[in-house]
Image: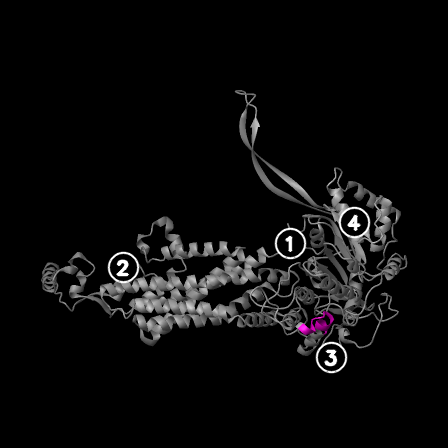
Amino acid sequence: MSRVVAADDNMSLPFFSPEPNHLSSFSGASTPTTFAQLLKNVGDTTVDLNDQHLVDMDLASPNRSVPFLLSFNDLTYSVKVRRKFSWKRVPSAADPVVGERSLSSSSKTKTLLNGISGEARDGEILAVLGASGSGKSTLIDALANRIARGSLKGNVTLNGEVLNSKMQKAISAYVMQDDLLFPMLTVEETLMFAAEFRLPRSLSKSKKSLRVQALIDQLGLRNAAKTIIGDEGHRGISGGERRRVSIGIDIIHDPILLFLDEPTSGLDSTSALSVVKVLKRIAQSGSMVIMTLHQPSYRLLRLLDRLLFLSRGQTVFSGSPAMLPSFFAEFGHPIPERENRTEFALDLIRELEGSAGGTRSLVEFNKEFRQRKAEPRTQTGLSLKEAISASISKGKLVSGATTTTTGSDSTPVSTIPTFANPFWVELSVLAKRSMTNYRRQPELFGIRLGAVLVTGFILATMFWQLDNSPKGVQERLGFFAFAMSTTFYTCADALPVFLQERFIFMRETAYNAYRRSSYVLSHSLVALPSLIILSLAFSATTFWAVGLDGGLMGFLFYFLIVLAAFWAGSSFVTFLSGVVPHVMLGYTIVVAILAYFLLFSGFFITRDRIPGYWIWFHYISLVKYPYEAVLINEFGDPTKCFIRGVQIFDNTPLAAVPQGMKVKLLSTMSKSLGMRITSSTCLTTGYDILQQQGVTDLSKWNCLWVTVAWGFFFRILFYFSLLLGSKNKRR
């Protein structure tokens, strides 16, 4: 029988327990300090350097047992550098001295990680340091399972077991170097949406809000809670606050493993210290914090538990900060008494990298030093499932996780869902977030609506009240071709929408905040209201002003086909945004392809006249189907006449002949044809025009459904582009 012990509405969350506790071992002698309790005094608690020695002694104790131990052994990762082509001189029989020139190609393999080993423990901060290009971010990606399987050699284990992708996504979080946030959401809203994604539906709205409020206080963001994130065009919070928000959205569910890539990059010393203090409390709450740092200050060094220095993919030092002086003293380069230890180490490493032998001597000395100063092997005492189950029961991993008891031995087994919430909850939250962000940027939709209204006004005044003469027929054809192609071109603004959200999407889906299918569907639903308004504005501006036929029912169908055209165009551009990584390249492709669609739509050259080797492009043209639909809507009445009697001479050289002469010519033609043709005889109906244009294979409703189907087709392609193109892993 299952027993759910995860947080729900009938339980008090450990985050908010008011009882003060102290950090203890996992042995169960005392209740461990919870996440929120340890964060409560972020700004008040400092760590003295003397305490660091005590921590090191404790970590080196052979009796110390930790719940979680992340080990990585002999990690090696190489990439192939792009091939370079060069002309090479090859001796020939004809001219052995000068020879002949031949084109040769060469490829080079660059090793980014070279046999990196080490370990990280819960309750600690492991900081990876090194110069730019040393392999810091690559190592973090390797530990966070962000390198494709097969490309990385070596192994990474947690409590002796290899983590599968699903489990690692559930128990870990990754904070990228760049602060990827929606600019028009406030700090509180950003964290609340993160809570809606990562916390289970079983947790009530009030408790999620309580979790967010506690996190705001512990991150030191109370004064900025109601301030928007901001961007280049909107003033918002500071850089340090943005970084803490980025951390907050990834620790909302209290993960066991937390990876951070340069969390202090671009921050002043005070903001950087505040961020690392937060990370220290997160580690002490029972999490394992692994991050990269470029060059920590003396105050930051006091908060770190373990350091790992890298140089060109190799380990040059691994141990606690307290070991640095003895390490470099034995290496023959003692650290001056008042000098920053990490700055000295990094400067020395750079100096060695520029020397003939490189850092080989330091790498070899580090291996020898670690053998002489080998710490007793850390023991976990618990299997991975037991450790996760115990962490869940103490309030970690608030993501819908449960522990179950099976059989008579009551062995705890962890059950961690792939996603914290069902599909429809994700859909609702994603749609709400997008609408909130767009609503605060009304100028974006306003510009698009203005462009549609201006285009409609120009068309209405240019094609004002067209008549049913032969010239009127030609003008109608031109109006429809331009109007339908314009609806597609005005959809090009959808291109940067996903390109701006791409990295936010990749960050959130990388650790299963929501399903990709939820994102695609919510993206479509959010776009519909604006498309309806744009279609109605364009239809109302042009239909009656141009004098189109069909009355109210004709207008309704005209509106529907314009809406379908907007839908198909928006879907097509959205799909391209999932494939093309750059805005300008995307615009170039969109404009070119839409021009081809218009060329093969049947306006410039009818279907019957298109060469056989290009006819396939006619049938995949997005402009073809709405163009033919509006033609059928306009000329589909078989009783309506467009050319009568002498109008047959319009658009011909005989158009300049006097009216009397035209009547005589018409009489002569009647005798020759053996039928009476008068000035009122209908010679061309709407159906005749459709036949002349080659619009006979589909009805107007079929054209409408095909246009709508194209929209769904490109949305499905957009989904697969996200599925295949946003793995967020190195290869």
Residue 32, image quadrant: bottom right
Q: Which residue is mark 1?
A: 729
Q: Which mark is residue 345?
A: 4
Residue 50, image quadrant: bottom right
Which is more N-terminal, label 2 or label 1?
2
Which is more N-terminal, label 1 or label 4?
4
Which is more N-terminal, label 4 or label 2?
4
Which is more N-terminal, label 3 or label 1?
3
Between the residue at mark 3 and the residue at mark 2, the CA separation in whole angstroms equals 73 Å
In what quadrant of the picture does the N terminus appear? bottom right
Residue 394, image quadrant: bottom right
Q: Residues within 10 Å of mark 4 (few under 14, many from 20)?
A: many
Which is more N-terminal, label 2 or label 3?
3
Q: Residues within 10 Å of mark 1 (few under 14, many from 20)?
A: some
Q: Position of residue 336 (x, y in %)?
A: 84, 50
Q: Disc 4 marks which amino acid?
A: Ala
Q: Residue at x 85, y 43 (%)?
A: 332
As for residue 222 lying within the magenta part, the answer is yes
Q: Secondary structure at mark 4?
A: helix
Magenta-drawn segment:
214-223
Q: Position of residue 437 (x, y in %)?
A: 56, 70
Q: Secondary structure at mark 1?
A: loop
Task: Indicate which label's residue lies in the foreground, 2 or 4.
Answer: 4
Q: Disc 3 marks which amino acid?
A: Asn
Q: Main secondary structure of the magenta part?
A: helix
Q: Which mark is residue 692?
A: 2
Q: Residues within 10 Å of mark 2 (few under 14, many from 20)?
A: few
Q: Secondary structure at mark 2?
A: helix
Contact (CB < 8 A) between labels 1 and 3? no
Q: Residues within 10 Å of mark 3 (few under 14, many from 20)?
A: few
Q: Is any atom of residue 72 visible in this view?
A: no
